[in-house]
Amino acid sequence: MTIALGVLGCGTVGQGTVLLAHRRAEKIQHLTGFRPYVKRILVRDLEKTRSPEIDRSKLTNQAYDILDDPEIQVIVETIGGIEPARTYILEALRRGKHVVTANKDLIALYGTEILKVANDVGVEVLYEAAVGGAIPLVGPLQENLTANEVTDLKGIINGTTNFILTQMSETGAEFADALAEAQALGYAEADPSSDIDGLDAARKLTILASIAFHARVELADVQVEGIRHITARDVQYARELGCVVKLLASGTDRNGRLSLRVRPTLIPLAHPLAHVSNSYNALFVRGDAAGDLMFFGRGAGSMPTASAVVGDIISLLRNIRLGVAGSPENRLYLQKRVVPDEMLYQHYVRFSVSDKPGVFARIAQLFGDAGISMETVLQKRVEQGQAEIVVVTHSIPAHRMDELCDALAQVQQVQKVACVMPLEALSE
Amino acid sequence: MTIALGVLGCGTVGQGTVLLAHRRAEKIQHLTGFRPYVKRILVRDLEKTRSPEIDRSKLTNQAYDILDDPEIQVIVETIGGIEPARTYILEALRRGKHVVTANKDLIALYGTEILKVANDVGVEVLYEAAVGGAIPLVGPLQENLTANEVTDLKGIINGTTNFILTQMSETGAEFADALAEAQALGYAEADPSSDIDGLDAARKLTILASIAFHARVELADVQVEGIRHITARDVQYARELGCVVKLLASGTDRNGRLSLRVRPTLIPLAHPLAHVSNSYNALFVRGDAAGDLMFFGRGAGSMPTASAVVGDIISLLRNIRLGVAGSPENRLYLQKRVVPDEMLYQHYVRFSVSDKPGVFARIAQLFGDAGISMETVLQKRVEQGQAEIVVVTHSIPAHRMDELCDALAQVQQVQKVACVMPLEALSE
């Protein structure tokens, strides 16, 4: 039996999905009883040059050619962004169609609304591809790991920043040059702000944390800091400390108190996340029964993302065959409080001071007054009357580090507190 | 609504399962509609001292107290080994009970029979815990990654050998000493042969390869080589080559031609599997759409394995609620040929020769005659008139390396071809 799919969008992911669904049609028929075929594809520009494998007769620039087609039971949304994707998905759901989407922005911001409509109508919304590209994350967190209380999520879930930081680490490049290279290679957008300012990672964290902690968290719950201010020297100092710098998205659950952050972090080389380089993504999960787990793979790209989209299509078709697609579920059934990060971290802090006698004693005094021990004073680099100091503290709560930085900034001889990063602890 | 479980076995995994199912009862009720309770537990010795959390009134030493109890719908088998586990599982299935098992030996050897009986009766057999402990492997391969043709599986799936090899690498210990330490710490059995000779890994590979390649493979299809002959010097030489030695289980599918091997292998430090240390397990998967993926975590232990068992129980209860538990499936629907490993690998070979003039020329001649180039001649260590030679070859098929070793062994001055290992290539 065939089943008609309507694909919204024919960019990188849309095209990959059309090709992969076609290539795997026989296998999918065997596994699910349905042979999928793409009936229509929504595009903005009918005339644009496309892969010869895309059948042009299927293209339309009218969304309602697809949404109003009663034969199409499954909508695959690959447009991305909020509108018009949100409207199309809601319209599809209200017409009783199942939806598979790769849209992280939409699920992060409107997931509650979309899942509620789907539940009310009795159809399914699947979004494995919205986080981590090809890496199965939604599935394992929603299925295999549910016997756990997940206490920690730590993810490198933005490929653009990971590529930039890897380049900075391997070639000694400054941020701006590494960004330019990422743009030249297509790893970064012309306007890279949503990646490099951490927003993309924060959206994905919102999705993952909601699933892992069984409680809806919102984007506004995530404290976000990007990587624009990271310099080649920070990366070099990190290396001297036996660490790499990564943009880490982390969520913790301490007895129902959730903390969610995206920020540049020093990861020790012995940590499994330290070796996740370039455009790869990884999610580290700690469960109270499972212990430490890590999932690693390609977080973006045409076929890797299509792998997740078509995987969802296969699950959906199996559920349709069994008559259970869209069965009501309420996995986000707990209410949890989001609180500021209360964990203790060692902190890396780099700042510049006037190179004058007594300045370091004054700084050391400030640390002492704040009750914060220095574990390492890494470097003193003097240039034009300025000394650069890097300190690694003992473990302290983030807010005490913030207070210390405020105090440091008050000192007349301190030019600038240039960079503060937590240092990720190794597993016990 | 409550649902009664019968647990067979109360060792490490059985006990963990009982505790975790109890601890998560409320969550499971929310997610599935059923509150699980362990009604009976089969033990050999009723008098043995056990955790105070195990309710002694539930213990029985009569399997049929459980198998014949009509209230018990779900059997959790944690006995391990072939008999009596096989008989109990088959009897449970024939009585219409669903089965969750952590038994790799049984699934590897009798999986076909067991799954056929389950399909015929219309009940479910779940075995996520049989491979990789807490790491979700069966789930992702069976669900999320099905849009892929999986071409490569590479796994570190035996914690005992990984602990021994990690010790040898970190402390320079010889195999026998590292094994003794593993035994002292409880990572190795008194009779460690099934682990160190590679059989345990081969059984798990049989299970993983069957799922990933959608074709039933048998234990006899796996070429197995253990780690008894690996010396501290091999581990040291590997390190000089920028590699670590791991017992690698690998399965490849090249257009329907499968090759399955378990053998000690040199893994370059830049490979994601190189950093999987001690008792951790990991599976590297390459799919034609997803690209390279890795799954990492604890491969054994009470709570990690219970995490997978209880995860399966949750999936099963959800399926029971939806009325689809035991729906017929035939995922291993393809017939594929198992062939000797045809891949090209660089090879590491270590052998001793009499330290006499002209011997190395003779050896080099043999390599040349076999058309095998030496990429590196790593070491010459002379002791009591013997020289030890380590050669890393260019990429060649394994069978040509075997032929060369046979030829080397014929040379009068060659004392012993002591160790041959392939060198795992990095991803493109």
Image (cartoon, coloured by chain):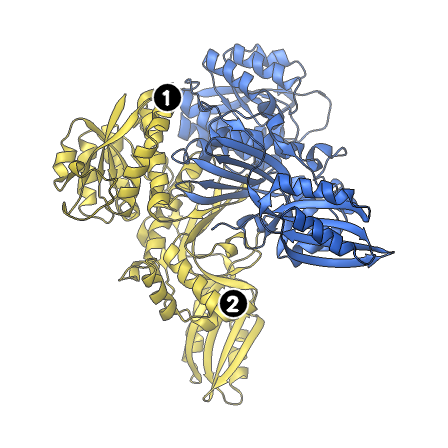
Chain colours: A blue, B yellow
Confirm whether residue A346 shows in the render.
yes
Chain letter of disc 1 in the image: A
Residue B278 percent location from the top left of the image? 43, 57
Q: What residue appears at the point 60 percent right and 28 percent down from the top-left corner?
A: A221
Q: List x then y, in percent, for residue B426.
A: 57, 55
Camera-side residue of B179 and B102: B179
Q: Quadrant of residue A27?
A: top left
Q: Which mark is residue B238?
A: 2
Q: In the image, what residue type sits under mark 1? A: Leu
**Residue hosting label 1:** A322
- Specify the label residue A23 is tagged with: none
The location of residue B242, given as percent across then percent down, is 57, 64
**Given this view, does label 1 or label 2 mark the residue nearer the observer?**
2
Which percent across, then down, holds residue A405? 71, 43
Q: Do pointers 1 and 2 mark residues of a single chain? A: no
The reply, left or right, for residue B38 in relation to residue A84 is left
Mark 1: which secondary structure? Answer: helix
A247 sits to left or right of B176: right
* Residue ID at (51%, 79%): B363
Residue B428 visible in the displayed image? no
Structural distance between the alpha carbons of marks 1 and 2 = 52 Å
Above or below — where is B205 with respect to B56?
below
Q: Is residue A42 above or below residue B271?
A: above
- Number of numbered discs on residues: 2
Residue at 68% across, 37% down: A225
* Amino acid type of the residue tagged 2 in the rendering: Ala
Q: Give the side of residue A35 with respect to residue A356, left or right.
A: left
Report the chain holding disc 2.
B
Label 1, residues with CA under 10 Å away: few <14, some 14-19, many ≥20: some
